[in-house]
Amino acid sequence: MTAVAKTLAITALPVWGMMSDYFEANKKILIFTILGTLTFSLSFLLTKSFFIIFILYSFFMIFSSSVVPLSDSLLLNHLDEKAEQYGQFRVWGSIGYMAGIIPFGWIIEQTQSEATFILAASGLFLSLFFAYKLPKSKRTIKVASLGSFKLLFKNKDLLYFLVFTFLIQAPLTANFVYFPIYFKSIGGGESLLGIGMFIAAGSELIIFQKADIFLKKFKLKKVLLLSAVAFGIRWFLISIWTSPLLLLLTQLFHGLTYALFHVTAVSYISKLVGEKFRSTGQNLYASIISISTVASSLLGGMIYDGAGGAAMYALGSAISLIAGFSYFYLLHKIEYGQKN
């Protein structure tokens, strides 16, 4: 069920972006996707039929998957030439996560599972209200025709970066799926796991807030290499450490890995595609992350079952380092070619 729903979401993501860019309706489509997500989240309460739940979940994924990239696109349109400040706004997502994870978890434990959908719908209703209050996009360039979107797939710099994104995101998304299982297998409990999630959220909060310092002070290729190396170190340490307490320390890397890479990627893609294709670019980025999630869940599971969690993380470390240095070399080569 999840695989089919994710596949539909991956297919829908570029379509939402293209509609937003072509009709210059970023805010309207964002509101529409939030409304759809809200509607289908409440619809789960109306049935216990597996087939109907499968249909509802598929539509839920189609609408919900595009909320974040469309929000990012709208924000970047307002920031315009100050895209490096994106992290200072994205930090509020981390704050919301940290503020909600404990009380929401307690409420769900004390009540029935239906509370999950009611809480989600409440948050989405507030999001819908504030999305309606957002100012319209400042777009000044119009997409001439649907055929113009072909230019994106001829943009080699964009395609190279999307491949790099896939290689970096695959070990990360595998970690999201299998870290709780691996953590418990070496003796970690639910409480320690919760602390680890809190540490990770706190570390990303700091980096989101200060990411513009990295982007202003260092070249793009160096920031991306730093993030890739941090990923490599993080996965390597998880592969060799067998103490739950030591594994908690690796969560401190979440800021330098996930947060720094995400801020840099969002800003860089906005630059690569330009104002005209900004929504489509962000949705393509989200599509690649979704594809990496599906691929890493399947392949990561095979490696985890066949060779163990340590081997899976060791492979993730190697992939991150190879991808990081390879892409650094590619950017350096392109930069050198432009100078000569």
Image (cartoon, rainbow, N blue to C red):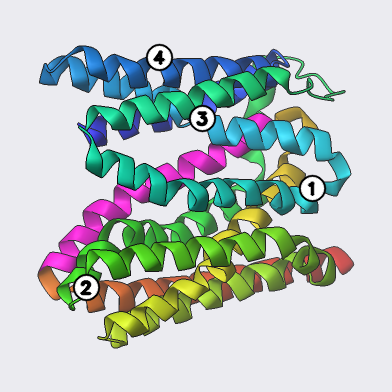
Q: Distance between the residues labelled 1 and 4?
A: 32 Å
Q: Where is residue 117 in the image (x, y as percent from the top left)?
A: 32, 27
Q: Residue 66 carries which label?
A: 3
Q: Main secondary structure of the magenta part?
A: helix
* Badge 2: residue crowd in 10 Å (few <14, some 14–19, many ≥20): many
| 86 and 266: which is toward the camera | 86
N-terminal of the pair, mark 4 or mark 3, is: 4
Tell me which segment is drawn in magenta.
Answer: 278-305
Do tag 1 and tag 2 residues touch (Cβ < 8 Å)? no
User: Visible in this render: residue 96?
Assistant: yes
Which mark is first along the chain, 2 or 3? Answer: 3
Percent from the top left, x then y, of residue 280? Answer: 62, 31
Does residue 156 show up? no
Mark 4 to mark 3 CA distance (whole Å): 15 Å
Q: Is mark 3 on a helix, strand or loop?
A: loop
Residue that numbered label 2 is attached to: 309
**Element type where label 1 sits in the image:** helix
Q: Which of marks 4 and 2 is nearer the N terminus?
A: 4
Which residue is pictured at 50% across the width and 15% down the height? 35
Asked which quadrant contains residue 67, the reply is top right
Q: Which residue is the site of mark 1?
A: 83
State the residue position of label 4: 39
> Is the residue 230 above or below the residue 60 in the image?
below
The kind of residue tagged 3 is Ser
- Type of amino acid at the residue the image marks with label 4: Thr
Q: Distance between the residues labelled 3 and 1?
A: 20 Å
The residue at the far front in this view is 110
